[in-house]
Image (cartoon, grey):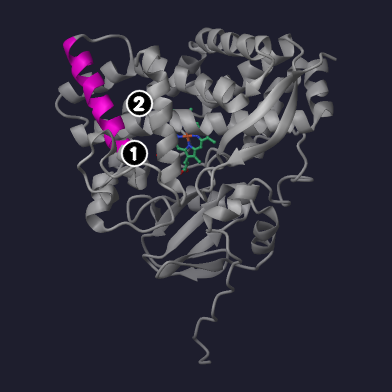
């Protein structure tokens, strides 16, 4: 080897195969990667990616968007052809200044102050769902509580009629499928004529969601209301601050992100509380623990498993040289189990006094827009479960999604257990 040659990188164990996630996050493999000095290289397709698994490295990548771009390439680990990248680009796959402009358009609705205005609505929906769950003696927790709660809230914010919630949950479920290696829809489902590679998640359900968003847009143009769609339509009217493409993709992103992620947190949260009744008892004994328990549930669940960035220039991370154009994939489930930050990271502990988890991303401009909303939904659910002294009993194994992108749960049966 010449003195200037770069040594071959250490290869990471397989973590991209969607089927690995059918048994949950492969924590042991991630622990092995975290222990490798520098960054490990993971072959993938014709090429590969740098596996960013340590908490400090996820933070460094997230907070340096000039070097680690969201717009070059794609934010998922698989590659897209140039035309598909443009056709599929949304807020999440942009850099400043487009990102700053688009994010400003929706950020106001998601500030802590404005999200608090939704607390009564969130509580009303939660009470209704929990009452039915208890009255019916339980059932599929995802179907009865975890899925309807977030979708009903985000649809109310957007101004979508409650009657359409079921249809949009169905579309969202098909999108999740598109992140794994199964696709149950035929390409022309919902009247789709667009090539699948040009649609988010390669799914004809994206076409249906775009159509639905367009319909909403026409309705709000004709009859404005006090909702998010009207707000976006008005922004569009005021000199094209948002293009039609951007509107369609924002609508799509808000429905998907507002629904799938919090549903996952609530599903894993219920399983964690059922498996650790002592931890739930602590929350019942001390209502002040609702807040840390909410953060712990979100850390524990880590609903989004990865986001990717692409190096805009030659650079270095954790002592590893990275060439312009190479991919870096941040694995949030690994950062959230990093022993350097979390004591006993594989323990579910509602008293953990840290909100240092990266389930909402590692900071920087793309930090989850809906973080305060998700926290509100989980904490109101915990408050209402506590008010009923509702213990959960898990009946059987969950049905998980085969995906390396979302930590999804399709169904898990729960029964209301005895009060303490
Ligand atoms: C527990 C629930 C949630 C989790 C774990 C979660 C996680 C994430 C993550 C990891 C990112 C990417 C961060 C990055 O690249 O740095 C993200 C971005 C985003 N999330 Fe969430 N999310 C959740 C709930 C929500 C909700 C309720 C909404 C509702 C609108 C939402 C909307 C978005 C949007 C629009 C983005 C893109 C932000 C941008 O690129 O500027 N999320 N989320």
Give the left or right position of residue 258, taking residue 239 as reference.
right
Q: Using the rendered view, name the quadrant where residue 201 is placed.
A: top left
For mark 2, what is the residue? 106
Residue 143: in sight, yes or no?
yes
For mark 1, what is the residue? 91
- The structure residue drawn at horizontal position 27% and vertical position 58%, both measured from the top left corner, is 81
- The structure residue drawn at horizontal position 53% and vertical position 48%, both measured from the top left corner, is 402
| Element type at mark 2 | helix
How many marks on residues?
Answer: 2
Q: Quadrant of the C terminus?
A: top right
Cβ(mark 1) to ligand 1 < 8 Å? yes
Q: Using the rendered view, name the quadrant where residue 266 is placed.
A: top right
Query: In the rendering, at what x and y percent does residue 213 appear?
Result: 27, 26
**The one of 218 and 188 positioned closer to us in this rendering:** 188
Q: Using the rendered view, name the quadrant where residue 73 is placed.
A: bottom left
Look at the image and give the residue range highlighted in magenta. 205-222
Mark 2 or mark 1, earlier in chain: 1
- The structure residue drawn at horizontal position 23% and vertical position 14%, both measured from the top left corner, is 220
The reply to whether discs 2 and 1 touch (Cβ–Cβ < 8 Å) is yes
């Amino acid at each position: 080897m010449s003195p200037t040659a770069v040594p071959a990188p250490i290869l990471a164990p397989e973590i991209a195969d969607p089927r690995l996630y059918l048994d949950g996050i492969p924590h042991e493999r991630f622990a092995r990667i975290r222990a490798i000095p520098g960054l490990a290289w993971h072959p993938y397709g014709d090429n590969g990616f740098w596996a960013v698994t340590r908490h400090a490295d996820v933070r460094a990548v997230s907070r340096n968007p000039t070097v680690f771009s969201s717009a070059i390439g794609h934010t998922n680990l698989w590659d897209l052809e140039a035309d598909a990248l443009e056709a599929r680009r949304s807020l999440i796959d942009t850099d400043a200044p487009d990102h700053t402009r688009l994010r400003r358009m929706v950020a106001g609705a998601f500030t802590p102050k404005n999200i608090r205005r939704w607390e009564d609505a969130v509580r009303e929906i939660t009470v209704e769902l929990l009452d039915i769950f208890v009255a019916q003696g339980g059932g599929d927790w995802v179907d009865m509580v975890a899925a309807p709660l977030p979708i009903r809230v985000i649809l109310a914010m957007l101004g979508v009629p409650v009657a359409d919630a079921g249809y949009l949950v169905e579309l969202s479920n098909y999108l999740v499928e598109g992140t794994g290696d199964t696709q149950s829809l035929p390409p022309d489902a919902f009247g789709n004529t667009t090539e699948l590679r040009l649609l988010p998640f390669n799914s004809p359900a994206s076409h249906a969601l775009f159509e639905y968003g367009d319909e909403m847009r026409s309705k709000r143009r004709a009859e404005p209301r006090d909702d998010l769609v009207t707000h976006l339509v008005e922004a569009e009217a005021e000199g094209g601050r948002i293009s039609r493409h951007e509107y369609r993709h924002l609508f799509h992103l808000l429905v998907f992100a507002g629904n799938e992620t919090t549903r996952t947190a609530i599903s894993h949260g219920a399983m964690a509380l059922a498996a650790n009744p002592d931890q739930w008892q602590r929350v019942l004994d001390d209502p002040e623990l609702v807040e840390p328990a909410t953060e712990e549930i979100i850390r524990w669940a880590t609903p989004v498993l990865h986001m990717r960035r692409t190096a805009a220039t030659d650079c270095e991370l954790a002592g590893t040289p990275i060439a312009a154009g190479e991919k870096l994939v941040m694995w949030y489930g690994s950062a959230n189990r990093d022993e350097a930050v979390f004591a006993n990271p594989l323990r579910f502990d509602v008293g953990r006094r840290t909100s240092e988890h990266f389930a909402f991303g590692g900071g920087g401009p793309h930090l989850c827009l809906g973080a305060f909303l998700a926290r509100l939904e989980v904490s109101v659910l915990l408050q209402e479960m506590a008010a009923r002294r509702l213990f959960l009993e898990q009946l059987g194994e969950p049905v998980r999604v085969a995906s390396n992108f979302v930590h999804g749960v399709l169904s898990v049966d729960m029964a209301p257990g005895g009060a303490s």
